[in-house]
Amino acid sequence: MRDEFHKLDKDGTGLINAEELKNAINASDIQIPETEVNKIIDEVDYFGNGKINYTEFLVATLDVKSFLDDNKLKALFN
């Protein structure tokens, strides 16, 4: 995942901005409106700086169902 993050982070800041995300999406031949790119950033951007850091990137790529089941959730909240 780290390598994928660094591929998106073209300017090497340790953050993925909207332009970098838009360029990556366009390069993959997926056509989505720029407003959707901004929405993705907003939903993933926990810290509210308009960019995605590595931790936010990892969280966004996790499939919650694959690692949390009822027993794990009960243990977590107990």
Image: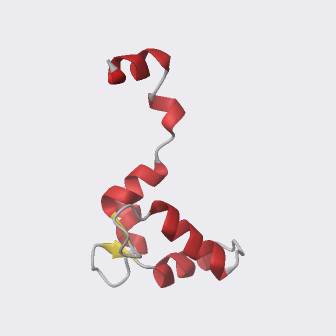
Q: Quadrant of the N terminus?
A: bottom left
**Count of all numbered marks drawn on residues in the image:** 0
- Return the residue nearer the eye: 64 or 31: 64
Q: Is residue 58 above or below residue 77?
A: below
| Along the viewing direction, whichever of 2 and 46 lies nearer the viewer | 46
Furthest-top residue in view? 71
Compare residues 76 and 9 and report the one nearer the observer.
76
Residue drawn at the location 37% of the way across and 58% of the way down: 56
Q: What x and y, as percent, mark residue 23? A: 55, 82
Vertical relation: 35 (above or below) 67: below
**48 left or right of 30?**
left
Q: Position of residue 73 (x, y in %)?
A: 42, 23
User: Where residue 69 appears, x then y in whole percent?
Assistant: 49, 22
Above or below 11: residue 31: above
Q: Does residue 42 lie above or below 20 as drawn?
A: above
State the colouring used for the structure image: secondary structure
Residue with the most extreme left position: 13
- The residue that appears at 32% across and 61% down in the rendered structure is 54
36 on left or right of 6: right
Q: Quadrant of the C terminus?
A: top left
Q: Nearer the viewer, residue 70 or 78?
A: 78
The quarter holding residue 6 reads bottom left
Q: Give the residue at x 28% y 73%.
A: 14
Tell me which residue sits at (70%, 74%) in the image.
Answer: 32
